[in-house]
Amino acid sequence: MIKLPVRNSTGQQQEIEAVLDSGFTGSLTLPPSLIARLGLPWRSRSSAILANGHVEQIDIHVGTIIWDGTSRSILIQALDNVPLVGMAPGDMVKCVV
């Protein structure tokens, strides 16, 4: 588990706890209810292959996190599960881990 500051739509930070998942190839997942509370803008819909092998259509939102003291805009997948931080190429974790 890691603590990750995420900015809401007004720029205020909220710290979330997320699991660092080396098998997840995205940037970050958050539950739809948390995305709504943060007011993160919707960007698109995409297909995702879940760990159980099922393919689901998911909403993609744009958000800002603070990683190693730096603000970074990332894509956030709306999944109703424990927040996951992944290893997306070029995104925040790959640069540091």
Image (cartoon, grey):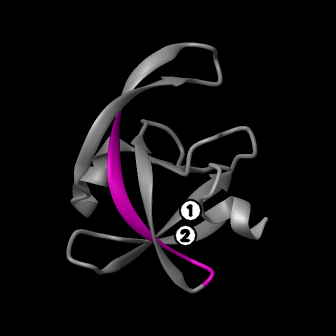
Label 2 is placed on what type of residue? Leu
Q: Is residue 90 above or below residue 21?
A: below
Q: Reading the chain from its start, which is encountered first: label 2 or label 1?
A: 2
Q: Is residue 20 visible?
A: yes
Q: Is residue 22 left or right of residue 81?
A: right
Q: Is residue 1 visible?
A: no
Is residue 49 magenta-colored? no
Q: Nearer the viewer, residue 53 or 80?
A: 53
Label 1 is placed on what type of residue? Glu
Q: Quadrant of the N terminus?
A: bottom right
Farthest residue, direction right: 97
Within 10 angstroms of label 2, few (less than 14), some, or many (20 or more) residues? some
Query: Which numbered tag is attached to residue 17?
Result: 1
- The percent coordinates of residue 6 (x first, y second) are 42, 69
Q: Secondary structure at mark 2?
A: strand
Q: Nearer the viewer, mark 2 or mark 1?
A: 2
Residue at 40% over, 68% down? 64
- The percent coordinates of residue 44 (x first, y second) are 28, 37
Residue at 65% over, 50% down? 89
Farthest residue, direction front: 90
Residue at 55% over, 13% down? 54
How far apart in space, not on screen, are marks 2 and 1 (Cα)?
Answer: 6 Å
Q: Nearer the viewer, residue 15 or 48?
A: 48
- Residue range in magenta is 59-68
Q: Is residue 50 above or below residue 29?
A: above
Query: Which numbered tag is attached to residue 4?
Result: 2
Q: Cβ–Cβ below 8 Å for labels 2 and 1?
A: yes
